[in-house]
Image: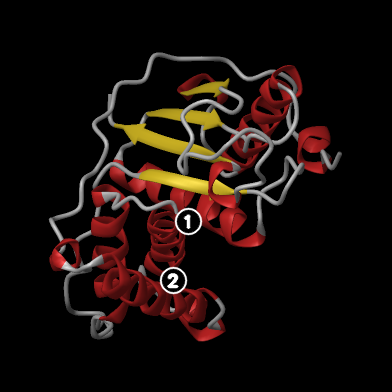
Amino acid sequence: MGNALGRVAAAGLATAVLTTTAWAAPASPLLQLGKSELRDALTSRYDTAVKGVGDPTLRAAQDSRWTYAVEAKNQCGIAIGFIKSGTKDADSINKCDDFVARLSAPPPPPVSAASAPPALDCTAPAVSIFFDWNMDTPLPEGANTITTLTQTAAQCGWKRFGVTGYTDTSGGNRYNDGLSMRRAQNVASLMSQGGIPTDAMIVTGLGETQLKIETADGVREPMNRRVEITASAN
């Protein structure tokens, strides 16, 4: 089991009470499509997001488009997973469409020295960090998302964070409880390295409960292997 991040992290993570309202995207016209058309539309948006995540110029740009690409990839993947199981998940469909629209919008013009900086988007995030099967260190794009989040936290005044780990349904309950906690601890360790105080985070592992994609027992569903990060200003 890989646990490199856990070894370099400070021992122990304090907990704090977190209250936050999950961000909801506006209703997408995709919800009006039939399942076949919807799956094609979601797949097209997923492909756009994957291309954006892998674009080094987008990652280096001084704006939010790469972060939008990462979130679009996550949410479109979740929506496609639901469609495969015969379900339309409005929340992930709305977020998929919204993040791809943000990603595809023209980049903001360069800011001249005399002009005011653009307004920072301080909408309280609800971010998912994904993992390979049976691993407790995040995928590379997840680590980059954590870096972006920690850099934005101070500017936006976010002071309380929830860091909650989950697993897919492969493996036993006791093992998955431990794996989900290690995932959450390792994500919290990265956040701590980025400047988030350990006593500002409530870190929990909920095993294979609260699945993003409902599956039978023993299924290695990638979208269920995750840590969810929430934030609030108080």
Is residue 38 in view from this perspective? yes
x, y (%) of residue 163? 51, 30
x, y (%) of residue 130? 58, 49
Give the mark toward the camera: 1 or 2: 2
- In this orientation, which residue lies closer to the viewer: 142 or 76? 76
Marks 1 and 2, how far apart at CA: 10 Å
Q: Amino acid at mark 2?
A: Trp
Image quarter of residue 135: top right
Residue at the image point whose x is 33% and y is 50% from the top: 87
Vertical placement of 124 versus 197: above or below? below
Q: Amino acid at mark 1?
A: Thr
Image quarter of residue 64: bottom left
Q: Secondary structure at mark 2?
A: helix
x, y (%) of residue 198? 56, 24
Is residue 122 in view from this perspective? no
Which quadrant: the N terminus? top right
Residue at the image point whose x is 36% and y is 34% from the top: 231
Q: Which residue is mark 1?
A: 148
- In this orientation, which residue lies closer to the viewer: 39 or 62? 39
Whether label 1 touches label 2, CB < 8 Å: yes
Mark 2 is surrounded, within 10 Å at the Cα level, by few (under 14), some (14 to 19) or many (20 or more) other residues, namely many
Q: Which residue is mark 2?
A: 66
In the rendered structure, the answer to whether residue 189 lies left or right of residue 29 reads right
Residue at the image point whose x is 57% and y is 54% from the top: 142
Q: Earlier in the sequence, mark 1 or mark 2?
A: 2
Q: Secondary structure at mark 1?
A: helix
Image quarter of residue 63: bottom left
